[in-house]
Image (cartoon, rainbow, N blue to C red):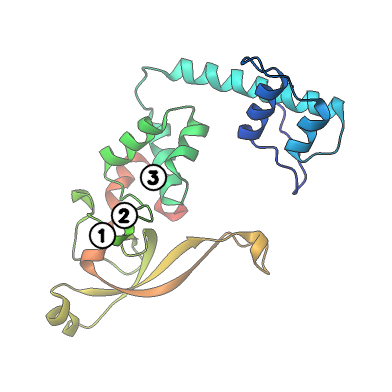
Amino acid sequence: MRKVKKQKHENITDTNLQRVTDMLAPTNGQSPITKKEACEILNIAYNTARLTRLLADFEERKEYVAKRKSANRGKSATKGEINEAITNYLQGDSVAEIAKYLYRSPAFVKAIIDRVGVPTRRTKEESRWPLLLPDQCVSEDFEVGEKVWCATYDAPAEVDARLEDSYIEKYGVPCYKVYIFEKVNASETWFPGIETGGFTAYQPAYDLGKLSHLKEYGVNLGRV
């Protein structure tokens, strides 16, 4: 399949391409839009040849995705799929994004995440309540340099240090200094080559989750 090239200002999303496809050949009795109007919806220069190519590429991609999904339907997750689902979710990809490039359904990907014990990111609405970590993640002891999940920020982190035991009296568990990893939009920084940033935080053990059990699925926590 050819990769669609687009300018920054162009609105060539799959949703918009489907909208234009439907409006060029409506099935509800309405009059079809013109190709000029189609170009305006996509915010591209008026060029019927390019419009035709974009729509043809879109249909080709849809057919390819449908075939891949059909071939995967009813099949159990492979080791590679489990590895990719876990790794990319920890790196910040959404369930929908992972499902798209695995040619699986979002429900299929979500089942993998839940089954293997990956901490889930909360929605804005859910963030008002504490995150309950999977049983496989619960611990009070973490090693310096260990990759963990920080429930406070719904993000992966690395343990920098264990704080003095005097904090145990206040929080009931050991506390740690951790570095929280977060994705960086390179276009919004002065350093276009940087994809990951973060910040330091101080967390009690009950807000941190172990990820070491994910290694049995081939996950390289160094990629997180």
In this picture, is 146 found above or below 89?
below
Q: Is residue 27 left or right of residue 36?
A: left
Q: Which image quadrant for residue 77?
A: top left
The crowd level at tag 3 (other Cα within 10 Å; few <14, some 14-19, many 20+) is many
Q: Residue at horizontal 15%, vertical 78%?
A: 168
- For the residue marked with disc 2, what is the amino acid? Glu
Is mark 3 in CB contact (under 8 Å) with mark 1?
A: no
Farthest-out residue, front: 30
Q: Nearer the viewer, residue 171 or 141?
A: 171
- For the residue marked with disc 1, what is the amino acid? Trp
Residue 200, position in %: x, y? 41, 74
Q: Which image quadrant for residue 78?
A: top left
Q: Is residue 21 left or right of residue 170?
A: right
Q: Which residue is mark 2?
A: 126
Residue 91, position in %: x, y? 46, 51
Number of numbered discs visible in the structure rendering: 3
In this picture, is 170 found above or below 78?
below
Q: Which residue is mark 1?
A: 129
- For the residue marked with disc 3, what is the amino acid? Val
Q: CA distance from mark 3 to mark 1?
A: 29 Å
Q: Which residue is mark 3?
A: 219
